[in-house]
């Protein structure tokens, strides 16, 4: 997805066992080459949720998570 204009999609929150999940539309999955079971980093702020999707952070690492927590907790 290389659009400079934002694209709006409606997503659904549904149940999966005892958890809730957000279902992403196929064009988003295909556009960012996201695969079932892939782990993503989710950043929660007062104004919303952000899922950064770059080559470096599509696969979350413990070091990256630790660095993010240190930056946001102090």
Image (cartoon, helix red, strand yellow):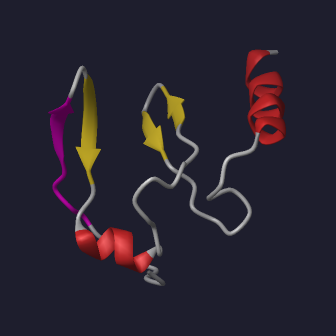
x%, y% of residue 63? 84, 38
Does 50 sit above or below residue 36? above
Closer to the camera in the image, 48 or 19: 19
Q: In this rendering, would 55 be left or right of 16? A: right
Residue 34, quarter of the rendered image: bottom left
Per the image, is 10 magenta? yes
x%, y% of residue 28? 34, 70
Closer to the camera in the image, 18 or 12: 18
- Quarter holding the N terminus is bottom left
Q: In this rendering, would 34 be left or right of 54? A: left
Does 5 sit above or below residue 19? below
Q: Residue furthest bottom?
A: 2
Residue drawn where x is 58% and y is 44% of the image: 41
The stretch of residues the image draws in magenta is 8-16
Is residue 5 among the parts visible in the rendering?
no
Residue drawn where x is 79% and y is 41% of the image: 64
Residue drawn where x is 80% and y is 29% of the image: 66
Q: In this rendering, would 8 be left or right of 74? A: left
Q: How many marks?
A: 0
x%, y% of residue 43? 56, 37
- Quarter holding the C terminus is top right
Closer to the camera in the image, 72 or 55: 55
Residue drawn where x is 51% and y is 55% of the image: 38
Is residue 12 among the parts visible in the rendering?
yes
Residue 71, quarter of the rendered image: top right
Per the image, is 65 magenta? no
């Amino acid at each position: 997805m290389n659009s400079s204009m934002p694209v709006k999609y409606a997503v659904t929150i549904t149940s999966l066992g005892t958890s809730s999940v957000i279902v992403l539309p196929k064009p988003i999955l295909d556009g960012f080459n996201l695969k079932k079971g892939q782990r993503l980093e989710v950043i929660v702020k007062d104004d919303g949720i952000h899922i950064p999707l770059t080559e470096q952070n599509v696969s979350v690492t413990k070091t990256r998570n630790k660095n993010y927590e240190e930056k946001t907790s102090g």
